[in-house]
Image (tube, helix red, strand yellow):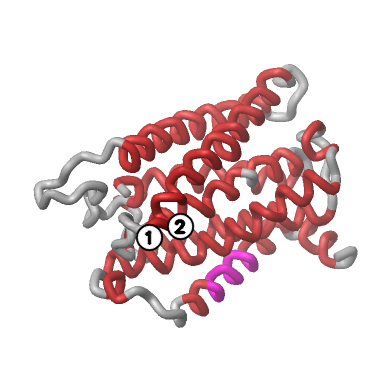
Amino acid sequence: MDALIPVLKSHPGPSVLVFALFFRVIHRLLKRLPVPKVVKQNELHHWKWNNLSVSMVHSLLTGAWALTCSLVWPETLSNLHSFHTPLSYLLICISAGYFVHDASDIILSGHGRGSWEFLLHHVLVISCFLYTLYTDVYVAGGVIALFVEVNSVTLHLRLMLKLAAAQYSSLYYYNKFANIITYVIFRLGTQFYLTLYIINNYSWLDNGAFFLICMMMMNIMMLIYFLRLLRSDFTPRKSPEGQNGMHNNNSKKFLSD
């Protein structure tokens, strides 16, 4: 670790690309795992399943890692500007690599137009993370931001169950409540905490305007997603086929699910 971090800090951009390739390898390996038959019958759903599988790996890894960093080093929660450890820097580098991989996967697979909201989110995250890696500031803030990945686990599971036509299963039923709870605590709560920190310390923060604009844009996106989630899972509309909860199941947009 002591030898790795100086290399990462000397070449943050290339290091992010290396980790992007790492997630590409994971993508290849996960494609060898069994896939539900109903998913394989639809090319778009098959791509979504593969994409979500990699996202699940990232969320499980970085969500647990971020929480561990904050528990082991409590200063992570209070000194978002200056505090960081080698492990927290490595975490941001790995996560930035994932977002580069995911953005490239969406674009190269031809789904950029239908997933433009995800691409906008990824551009904002990548910009913030690259700034952090190149300047050595806001690393702790990046760690806190990755708390949202705890919610991403239940969010990805929800989407994968829908792709597998298991939205009427007990697992989906319990997961939708866990998803709402983790969304409020780890996603909206994290966004609120970071936004409040920037506002309270705006006068002296480096490039505070840039981060405040990014946070406000993501806040709006997160609130819109939350309302869509509530409407989809708790007030589903009956489709023409008479099935509830299958709204736009063949849509080319992730967010319609």
> Given the current orientation, which residue lies at the most extreme bottom position?
32
Q: Chief secondary structure of the magenta span? A: helix
The residue nearer to you, when weighing 134 against 197, is 197
SS category of the residue bearing label 2: helix
The residue nearer to you, when weighing 52 against 80, is 52
Quadrant of the image containing the N terminus: bottom right
Q: Which residues are magenta?
A: 18-26
- In the picture provided, is 87 more to the left or to the right than 50? right
Magenta span has 122? no
The residue nearer to you, when weighing 97 against 161, is 161
Query: In the rendering, at what x and y percent does residue 165 appear?
Result: 29, 62
Residue bearing the label numbered 1: 161
SS category of the residue bearing label 1: helix
Which kind of residue does numbered mark 2 sit on? Answer: Leu
> Given the current orientation, which residue lies at the most extreme left position?
240
The residue nearer to you, when weighing 14 against 28, is 28
- In the picture provided, is 202 more to the left or to the right than 192? right
The image shows residue 28, relative to residue 137, as above or below, that is below
Disc 2 packing (10 Å; few <14; some 14–19; many ≥20): some
Tell me the residue at 77%/36% (across/down).
77
Query: In the rendering, at what x and y percent does residue 21 appear?
Result: 58, 70
**Discs 1, 2 touching: Cβ within 8 Å:** yes
Disc 1 packing (10 Å; few <14; some 14–19; many ≥20): some
Residue bearing the label numbered 2: 157
